[in-house]
Amino acid sequence: MMDEDFARLQRETARRRTFAIISHPDAGKTTLTEKLLLYSGLLRTAGMVKNRKGGRLATSDWMAMEQERGISITASAMQFEYRGAVINVLDTPGHQDFSADTYRTLTAADAAIMVLDAAKGVEAQTRKLFAACRLRGIPVLSFINKLDLPAREPLSLLAEIEEVLGIQASAINWPTGSGRDFIGVVERATRDLLLFEKTSSGGAQRAALRRLPFASDEARAALGESAHSRLREELEMLDVAGNPFSREAFLAGQVTPVFFGSALTNFGVEPFFDAFIELAPSPQARLALAGDGSLALDPVQAPFSAYVFKIQANMDPRHRDRLSFIRVCSGRFERDMVVKHIRGGRVLRELRLSRPNSLVARERTTIDEAFPGDIVGLINDGFAIGDTLSARAGIAFPELPQFPPEHFARIEPLDLARRKAFDKGMETLAGEGAVLVLRPYEQPLASPFIAAVGRLQFEVLQYRLRDEWGVETRLTPLSYSCSGWLEGDVARFQPTPGCQLARDERGRIAVLFPSAWDREYCLRQNPGHRLLEIA
Ligand code: G4P
């Protein structure tokens, strides 16, 4: 590679920030994403991204779902520039959209922003997503949102993060209060008070900031004597009793820096984004399998490599096709480059990567090049989740993690004459990671059943079988509600009543249980075995 090209690759890699926003529904993820677009100059006024309103959508209509939810479902990844950094935001739908996809998407992120509602603290979905980040060793920044409404005490929120999530929380700034009293934050490192100026247009424009030394008379006057002294006491207490912050500890996943703000009014949003750019890591070396061992692929030194982490169909009614999303791990991606398509360590074919797409809000644009950390959508059939694309043979990224499914069902075509189309559809969709296919252990010929992390995965599967393969199906739920991947000698495993052993297509063994209680009981009866949360 020429020196200039190398220097450019280095520069481009260093300014990439690839991350996911994780939160419980309604905490403000969409609003914060929108503000990031606003502050990056991509949207002139806020309110364009999000156009849904009110109650939950009927989940059965996949197309309507995509339209209703705007970018939240359509743009699986968005790219734009913010203050010289190239931002790649990955979408991780929460709640009922929760699926194996969500977990896989997190593998493509180098960092995560965790949005918490200041009145609610750590909620169920946040816990699950945080656990997935922790398993991947992804550093997490916390944004405590909705401070413009009555909120819980900031100290109790920090304590909850520590207790429930088991990570140290270190406040980078501190709110002046909540509701009407939330007029600014004190930046702890500089002891400056950042006062927010209300925007007339209700958050449609960026909020101006006034910076004053916290100890100044002006700051005292702005806050009022009693609020100022209360805040001073809180800050002193934090200095003594709070967790120290270091970037190393953050990158190692030991501490989460905490910021306070209101995505709706823009208060505290800009200081947060600026800190995010500073703190979040650029793409780092990724581990790949090579021969019998593994190899750390440096994003700049290693030749082009990427892997497929998500496949999405019917993203846009105007192009009824399938987009496979790859995350570039090393080297420069060029349009029309020829790469090796690797699955399970074997080169399947040589492939020209034509029509690469990048996404900005709703628009797809064709791109000519991409760098480590970038997400590229390829319109190309024949990819499966976890496939590696590489300039050279002999490497493969590890298989993507599979979390234990919680929903199980049998599925069959209503019209038996459509069996062939059904089988073909199932094979393709399972390869795309839409659902997991399991077979009862020791009965490899018994008919398979399907399993998923989120219930919605089944609905999407049925919809797609009908829409793309013309097969109507009948789904019969099975009465298991949790599972785990078996670790230990399967021959010595003593199944307890009601549990079922199954094998997936990669040969992993899952144990299915009617309830969490059955799972606990079974584990007690099998002290030599473990059930893994990820495999
Ligand atoms: P989500 O993507 O995490 O599900 O949350 P989303 O941003 O959609 O926000 C959920 C609701 O909370 C929205 O209200 C949104 O306007 C509101 N919200 C987000 N951030 C803040 C904040 O900082 N302060 C206040 N007060 N509200 C906030 P909605 O009524 O459901 O929708 P909309 O009609 O406002 O769009």
Image: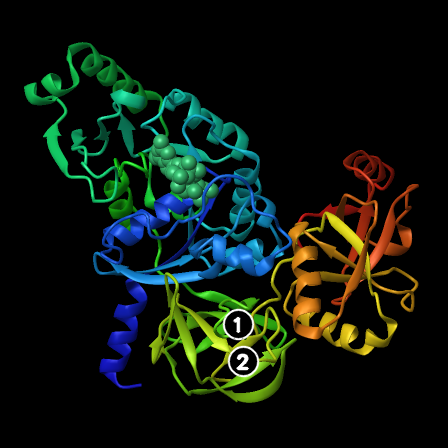
Q: For this view, does 211 lie left or right of residue 25?
A: left
Whether the residues at callouts 1 and 2 have beta carbons within 8 Å, the answer is yes
Q: Determine whether 470 is above or below 407 in the image.
A: below
Quadrant location of the C terminus? Answer: bottom right
Which quadrant holds residue 261? Answer: top left
Q: Secondary structure at mark 1?
A: strand
Q: Residues within 10 Å of mark 1 (few under 14, many from 20)?
A: many
Which quadrant holds residue 414? Answer: bottom right
Q: Residue at x 41, y 73 (%)?
A: 330
Q: Amino acid at mark 2?
A: Asn
Q: Is mark 2 within 8 Å of ligand 1?
A: no
The residue identified by callout 1 is 324
Q: Determine whether 239 is above or below 40 in the image.
A: above
Which quadrant holds residue 171? Answer: top left
Q: Is mark 1 within 8 Å of ligand 1?
A: no
Q: Residues within 10 Å of mark 2 (few under 14, many from 20)?
A: some
Q: Secondary structure at mark 2?
A: loop
The residue identified by callout 2 is 380
Q: Amino acid at mark 1?
A: Ser
Quadrant location of the N terminus? Answer: bottom left
- Residue furthest to the top in view is 226
Confirm whether residue 178 shows in the render. no
- The numbered mark, 1 or 2, whose residue comes first in the sequence reads 1
Q: Determine whether 236 is above or below 135 in the image.
A: above
Q: Position of residue 506 (x, y in %)?
A: 74, 67
Q: For this view, does 180 lie left or right of residue 283?
A: left
Q: Position of residue 353 (x, y in %)?
A: 46, 84
What is the count of numbered marks?
2
Q: Residue at x 49, y 58 (%)?
A: 67
Most foreground residue, 524 or 24: 24
Q: Position of residue 144 (x, y in %)?
A: 38, 34
Q: For this view, does 20 lie left or right of residue 309?
A: left
